Image (tube, grey):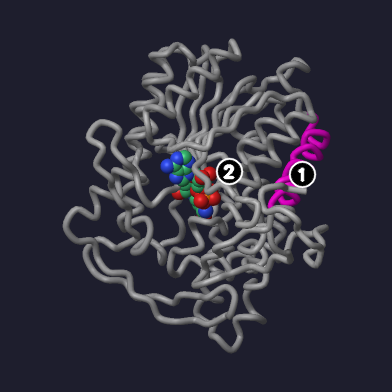
Amino acid sequence: MIIKPMIRSNICINAHPVGCAKDTEHQIEYVKSQKAKRGVKTAKEGGYAPKTVLVLGCSTGYGLASRISAAFEYGADTIGVSFEKEPTETKSGTPGWYNNTAFDRAAKKDGLKSSTFNMDAFSDECRQTVIDEVKKWNAKFDLVVYSLASPVRVDPDTKVMYRSVIKTIGEPCTGPALDMMTGKISEMTAEPAVGDDVTNTVKVMGGEDWERWITQLKNAGVLAEGCRSVAYSYIGPTFTHAIYRDGTIGKAKKDLEERAHAINSVLAKNGGAAYVSVNKALVTRSSAVIPVIALYMSCLFKIMKEKGTHEGCIEQMERLFAERLYTADKKVAVDEEGRIRMDDLELDSQIQAQVNELMEKVSEENVNEITDIAGIRHDFLATNGFDVEGVDYEKDIARMDKID
Ligand code: NAD
């Protein structure tokens, strides 16, 4: 069969198996070339590098890019957890399923251990599975990456299901929403949170689950001396704060950032540390659905590409590893609140001033000319395995549950 993207309101409901695999391979090639360029040495080569890494949310976006950097630049054995829809012979799975399959295949080829679990990472059953696996490997984690993005979470104690929402806190907020595929700009209003919206969103996207992971891994004795953990957050420019940083999701991120201090104290007892890394706004399966953000990204990418400072997920995570987590002097640069700032290039004042100018000028008539809508459209398609370089999209795909 020939597979074409099926898209509705910035959501793509199918994936291209070969395209997803190829996109994962491109990211692997990138970090391998960076390894050579930077002269990175793996632990086996005598370098300062993690040996065994756990990535929660390993299948797409920042988590996949983190796992690829850990394995293919730093030589780590990795355990990954994600929640994906498996394909059947005729029906598409979610992109992450194909990415994981491509990752495991490449790791095996390079002699790296990798185990990938398709499980609910919020469950204690999943935690036990990971603990059993790393014990089987006779290894301990020296890095735990927390990169989950989910609309729901079942509390492992009460079994209550919580839902996260993207809402403001206080006043409603109206802003432009860009349809990446058509270039249509409509006005969208984000309603203010009501009832338990805030606490529920914090329950799903805050730091409670991250803390539970670290506690249980520690109690099971599977954290190595000096083990570090990193979780991801976003802040963004002031004009997005009403919908993001000062809204329900921002509340959850602030909770994550606060809990990082408690997790840090636990890990510090063993010579380790916990960090929140504030990353750049990028097109992933989670971010594509946040209003205003798509239009902002199309302006941001335009300016950053012109300046030569644009990065995608893999460039961001490769830089996180090489220039923050595993530096020559073994020091991690952080801001006054202890956070790693990978959004430094995005929030550069000159960049933001130019983005503001563009945001004021942009309309449906000129969006194709003055912004990088083509770039974010490409990224959006590529996260689902479409529009990936080197893939013949006219070639018949015999089975949807294979990547070649
Ligand atoms: P993504 O949607 O690409 O990845 C989310 C991952 O979580 C996937 O691997 C998915 O399978 C996994 N997942 C979701 N629910 C799960 C569950 N119950 N059990 C196991 N795995 C589950 O998202 P992303 O944009 O890469 O986001 C990752 C982190 O980075 C989030 O904390 C997000 O807030 C943060 N972040 C994102 C951006 C951005 O612009 N995309 C910017 C800064 C920070």
Residue 347 is at least partly visible in this image? no
Residue in front for this viewpoint, 228 or 382 = 382
Q: Which mark is residue 30?
A: 1
Amino acid under disc 2: Ser
Viewed as shown, does residue 209 lie left or right of 114?
left
Q: Considering only vertical position in the picture, is 337 above or below 298?
A: above
- Mark 2, ligand 1, within 8 Å: the answer is yes
Q: Considering only vertical position in the picture, is 80 above or below 328?
A: below
Q: Residues within 10 Å of mark 1 (few under 14, many from 20)?
A: some
Main SS type for the magenta part? helix
In the rendered image, the residue lying farthest to the front is 89
- Measured as percent of width and height from the top left, residue 20 is found at 69, 52
Viewed as shown, does residue 399 lie left or right of 249?
right
Q: What residue lies at 79% left-to-right and 62% top-to-bottom? A: 396
Amino acid under disc 1: Tyr
Secondary structure beneath disc 2? loop
Residue 332 is at least partly visible in this image? yes
Residue 332 figure quarter: top right
Q: Which residues are magenta?
A: 20-39
Earlier residue among tags 2 and 1: 1
Viewed as shown, does residue 285 lie left or right of 377?
left
- Mark 2 and mark 1: Cα distance apart in space: 17 Å
Q: What residue lies at 68% left-to-right and 68% top-to-bottom? A: 4
- What quarter of the picture does the N terminus occupy? bottom right
Q: Which mark is residue 59?
A: 2
In the rendered image, the residue lying farthest to the left is 195
- Measured as percent of width and height from the top left, residue 251 is found at 31, 49
